Each structure stands twice: as C-alpha cells, then as structure tokens.
Amino acid sequence: MQRGDAHGNPDLGKAIVAEHLNKIFQVTKGTFRRSKTQVVAVKDVSFEVDYGELFGLLGPNGAGKTTTIKLLTTMLIPTSGDATVLGHNIKKDVTKIRQRIGIVLGGERGLYTRVSAVDNLRYFADLYGVPKNVRDKRIRELLEFMGLWERAHDRVETYSKGMKQRLHLARGLINDPELIFLDEPTIGLDPEIARDTRKMIEDLVKKGKTILLTTHYMFEADELCKRVAVIRNGEIAALDTPSGLKKYVKDACVVEVEGFGITDKEVAKFKEIPDVLSVSADLAENKQVLKIQTPKGSEIISEVQQILKDSRIYDIKIKEPTLEDAYLRLVES
Amino acid sequence: MSQSLRVVYSAFRMAMLHWMADPQWVIPNIIAPFVFTTVALTLFKDSTGPFGLYAVLGGGMMGMWGNTLYSSGFAIEFEKWQGTLEEVMAAPSKLIHVIAGRSVSNALFGLTNMIAVLLIAAAGFRVSLDIANPVMFSVALILTLISVSALGLIFASSFVLSRSAQALTNGLETPLYIVSGSMFPIALLPFWVHPAAYILGPTWGIDAIRLATSPDYASQSFWVGMDPSAAIILDIIVMVAITLVYTAVAIVLFKAVEKRARIKGTLVQA
C-alpha cells in the first residue's frame, strides 16, 4: 500500500490526521428583515486514524458527523484548523486526495436511476480517471462482489433500497481507494440488508482498506470499529475503543422502565432529579422503554413510581450499563 | 484522449443515455419547433423575397437557442434532482468538464431542433430550402451552437449556488433571442440595445447563417458592402473570439463558485 505523498513529502504514518477542525456556516433568517446567524457545525475536532483501521464517528443526527466527513474529503473548506488525508493537506492537495479516496454518502439518491448500474459505474470510473484497460474488469468485479452482476444492465430505478445501497458502495470503490468514507451506510435499511452491508464493510477492512464510518447506531460501531469518536454538538465528547467507552458509565447503573402512556413531561421530570445522569425514551414493539442512568440504583424506584403514577408500568429492572448506555450518556450529557 | 476530454465525453454519453431514456425530448425537439415555425411563417406570409427561409431559420434558432441555453443551465439542476451533484463534485475531475459534456449533448439536441424545423417547413409549408453556401452555412450553424453552449456554461455556474437560477435562464431566454436578432434584424431594435447584441456570440453566428443562406441578406448584414464570403468569415472570427471569452469567463466562474460552495456549504444545503 502506498503511504504518504507520491511527491516525496513526509509520510505522517497516519491515514487521517485532523487538527482542531472548525466549520461555521452562515445562515440567513427572515424574508424581509434578514439577519445572519452563525451555526457551528464542527468545533475543535482532532483525531487520528491509522492505516488499515476502521474508525467510527458516532453521534446523533445533526451532531456534525457528515460535516466532518465533508471536510476530510475536501468537499468543504474548514473555517479554521487543518487536516491531512493519506499524507495530503485537505486545503492544498484537493485533487490528490480525491484520486485516492472513496466516498459513500448513502441514501436512495446519488445515483443515476434512469440508466444501468454499469453505466453509473462507468461514468464515475471516467470521472476518477480509472485506466480504461482496467475499468470494465473492475466494474464487473465490484458488481459481482456486491451481488449485483445479474442485474447489472437493468435500470437502477428498478432496484430495491438494499441494491441501491450496494451500488453506492461499488461506486465508492470504483477508483480502488486506499481510504473509504462511509456516511451512515446502513441507515434506512432493513436488518438483513444492514447485516450484509456490515459484512461487506468488514471484508473491505480485511482487504487492507482504511475506513472512516459514521453511524448513530452504537451496536454497529461496537461490531465494526476498532476505535470510536462520539461526536456531540460538533465536538468530540469521547474517543476510545468501544469497550473503553464503558468507563463513562462505570459510576452508574441503568433503571429500565417498561410501560405505556409515558409523556414527554414525565420524561422531563426525571431529568430534574438530582443524581440522574441521563434519561432516554424509546418505543419497543407495543411499549415504551425508559432508561434512567443513575448511581442511586434501586433507591430511585419509588420516585419513578411517583412520577409515573398516571401511566401504566409493566416492569422495572436494574441493569449494568451497556455500550449503548455509554453512548446515550455521552450524547445527552 | 486526455483526462479532461474523457470526462467531457463521458458526461456527453451520460446525457445522451438520459435523453434516450426519457421520451419527453419530443416536446422541445419536435413539438416546440413545429409551433415556432408555424408562428414564424404566419408572421412573414405576406412578405416577398427569401423571408420564408429567414423565418424558418429564426424559428429554428429560437428553438435551438432555448433548448441549448435552458438545458445547459439545467445540467446542474439535473444533478441536484438526482442527488448526484455532491458525488460529481467530490470526484477529482473538474465540474466544468462535466457540464461542458452535457452542454455539447444539448447543442446536439439543439441541432436536431433546427433540422426538425427545416424539415417541417419544407414538408409541411413547402418553403424552399435553397442555401447559397451550404458549407459555410453548416460551419456557421455548428459554431453558433458551440457559442450558445458556451453562454449556457456561464449560466450553469450560477446553478451551483442558487436554487432560483432557473428563473434567470427562463427570464433571459426571450430577451436574448430578440437581442441576438434571431427573428428580425438588429437594425430594427433601438440603438441602445445594439451593444448588448454585439457581445452575444450567436448574434454574429446568425448574421453568418443568413449571409450563407442568401446573398440578398448582405444589405442588412453587419458588413454592408462587403463580399458575402468575406463577411461570413469576419462574422465567424468575431463569434469564435466572443465564444473564447465566454469559455474563459465560465472557467473563472466555475472555479469561483466551486470554492464558494466549499466555503459556504451551499451544496450541503441544496
């Protein structure tokens, strides 16, 4: 694998080095009385990614994951801070970086749906300057790898969501990139297709690719990533191995309440209790699941029952915190 | 083939594939020229001389002009609709090469537009299509198409940043058509419009096309009193020079808007 700069610039030994990246967008508000406000999308983000590593950027929607990817892939220029990708500077070496990386932004859009998968890949192969003598062979290999070869000449508009996602991945690999940026590659996919996609990502790492993956699924980061940066409001809240992130919740246990009819007002009341570190509410099948992180453990149960006196409670359990709890704590605190 | 030309060709090919996949091309390429030709021939039906052919050329130019200009501007909008603009802009190739490829394909559609008008006029309205200098007519026509495409490239750059750029091309289509003298000689327009006409490459192209069509037009040409062949060459030289300026301006604009998009994140919000 080629490392560093083809022109003899020093190899930094890291696939990605981000140093104090900031991105501020100007947003205009109002129709007649226009005013400009600043939105900080990424704030003082620094991290490094090793060659061959699968690194995860984990965070809720709007946390700044995609903006970070766009900064590193040269699609955006940082307001301040700097970064090197494969030894190239993101501000100065735009073309060199783009030639050596792959980007998969995901979703159902981003493909030419009126033409075939082969035509999509051929087009992007030309845009990336893939040598003509390897182009067609690589297109076939990629479509076979993604299990799309039998439908290769069908219009993309006839593909299922999962097939489109696999075609996105194939497109991101068309230039045989050393480093691949995957932005929420499993979002919106059904569990089976999401599992297949994760398997493909693992296979890419086995092939020696470096991957930066964004996701808001803790279990996905846990399953795939060697290290994870949890990003919250544009800032890195924690950076560790998935199991290392557990230390952020070692001081607490989780009171899990299964019930029905729990209102937002009641959830907010829990947040006011001293020693409650985080509260999350989710829907699971036909019930609501409330997770309250607190060092008080079973001592809080009477307060739970008091707050939820107007709702139906099915069960209350005291649990050891999981990685997902660590994530929730980090993004909510 | 250099990488730049390869990207232009690939974008051209992709546009052609979409064109073939979408039967809506019939509207701008067959139905619209038919309407233009009918209107033009009705307007000029009582005139003497080669006005029938002028009218046909005017109608054809109008269709070609609108088709090429609209489509060139639309090239960016098309990428936005498909959600592919970010992917295309993230590639190492230059966006202007991609749009140039699409513009060339649009120019070709424009040519089919003109051919459709000529065929409809000849078959449906029995207009004589005698062209005095077919070689120079063809050269002038193709260069005019390229000039319109280059102007389309300038408009296309605005689409990278603006969601309402479509209004710009829609609003300018008719004024540009009138100012360039597509339907009637520029001499009929107020004098203050003339400078605007002279900086439009297609204005000179239309002059060359009309001169190549009939020497009778020489009295209304920009080069009154000059030998028609020499006048055509002068028209072409001026048009090529203006087209080169358009291309240079488009390159600068694309560089500027790409940088602006990377700073302001306009594409992210598109």
Image (cartoon, rainbow, N blue to C red):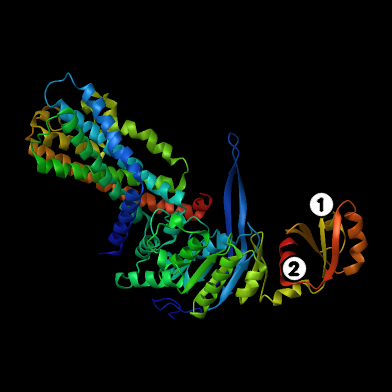
Instruction: Name the quarter where the N terminus of chain B is drawn.
Output: bottom left
- List the single residue furthest toward the top: B46
Tell whether A214 sits left or right of B220: right
**Outermost residue to the left:** B227
Q: Residue B77's spot in the image, x, y percent?
A: 42, 46
Q: Label 1: chain?
A: A
For residue B182, what is the image quadrant?
Answer: top left
**Residue drawn at (41%, 52%) of the image:** B256
Q: Position of residue B160 (x, y in %)?
A: 43, 49
Question: Would you identify the image quadrant in which residue B69 lies?
Answer: top left
Foreground pick, A135 / A50: A135
Q: Secondary structure at mark 2?
A: helix
Looking at the rendered structure, the kind of residue marked 2 is Asp
Q: Residues within 10 Å of mark 1 (few under 14, many from 20)?
A: few
| Dot 2: chain letter | A
Residue B58 falls left or right of residue B266 = left
Up/down of B162 relative to A52, above or below: above
Residue B233 coordinates in the image, percent (x, y): 12, 42
* Residue to which mark 2 is pinned: A325
Q: Residue at x 8, y 33 (%)?
A: B226
Task: Work out whether residue A15 can be spotted.
Answer: no
| Whole-percent x, y for residue A332 in the image | 74, 61
> Residue B111 appears in which quarter of the rendering?
top left
Number of the front mark, 2 or 1: 1
| Three-letter code, disc 1 | Gly
Residue placed under numbered mark 1 in the picture: A261
Residue A278 circle label: none
Q: Secondary structure at mark 1?
A: loop
First in sequence, mark 2 or 1: give its number: 1
Question: Does residue A51 lie above or below A332 as drawn?
Answer: below
